[in-house]
Image (cartoon, rainbow, N blue to C red):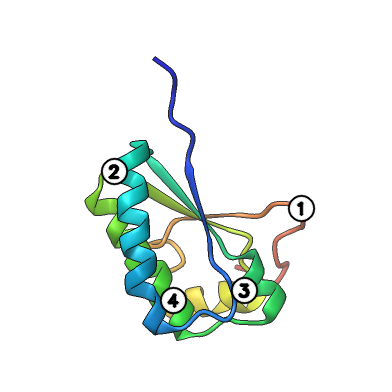
Amino acid sequence: MTAVEPLVVRLAAPLTRAQVPQLCEHLRGQLELTGAAEVIVDTHALHQAGQADFAVIDALARLRLTARRAGAGTRIRDPGPALLRLLQLTGLAETLGVVEHRGREPDPDRT
């Protein structure tokens, strides 16, 4: 039996709270279709656009909840320093998943 690859969800900027229910519904469908046990939420485009706000936090939290209900775990990929600080400020950095950085070093100010 082959292992199922993680499902990658790329968040595009600008992200609004109105888009979050559609993102969650799409994720739910993809998890049912693929049977993936892990979801990687790629936030690189948000970092590039300079978006680190509560719409992003809402999306990350609700996507994690959607994945968890389907039996999958989550990781956040390529958050920028501002999003990392916001996750830490809200106390959600650990709750929302292991942060992974691809192609760049983590923010040295991150504690």
Mark 1 → mark 2, Cα distance in angstroms: 30 Å
Q: In which quarter of the image is residue 43?
A: bottom right
**Most distant residue in the right direction:** 104
Mark 4 → mark 2, Cα distance in angstroms: 24 Å
Residue hosting label 2: 32
User: Who's the residue at 22% across and 53% down the image?
Assistant: 69
Amino acid residing under circle 1: Gly
Amino acid residing under circle 3: Leu
Q: Nearer the viewer, mark 3 or mark 1?
A: 3
- Which badge, 1 or 2, comes first in the chain's sequence? 2
x and y percentages locating residue 102 in the rendered image: 70, 52
Amino acid residing under circle 2: Glu
Give the crowd class for mark 1: few <14, some 14-19, many >=20 residues within 10 Å: few
Does residue 53 sit above or below 8 in this rendering? Answer: below
Q: Looking at this view, is 95 or 4 the one in front? A: 4
Marks 1 and 2 close (CB-CB < 8 Å): no
x and y percentages locating residue 85 in the rendered image: 57, 77
Q: In which quarter of the image is residue 60?
A: bottom left
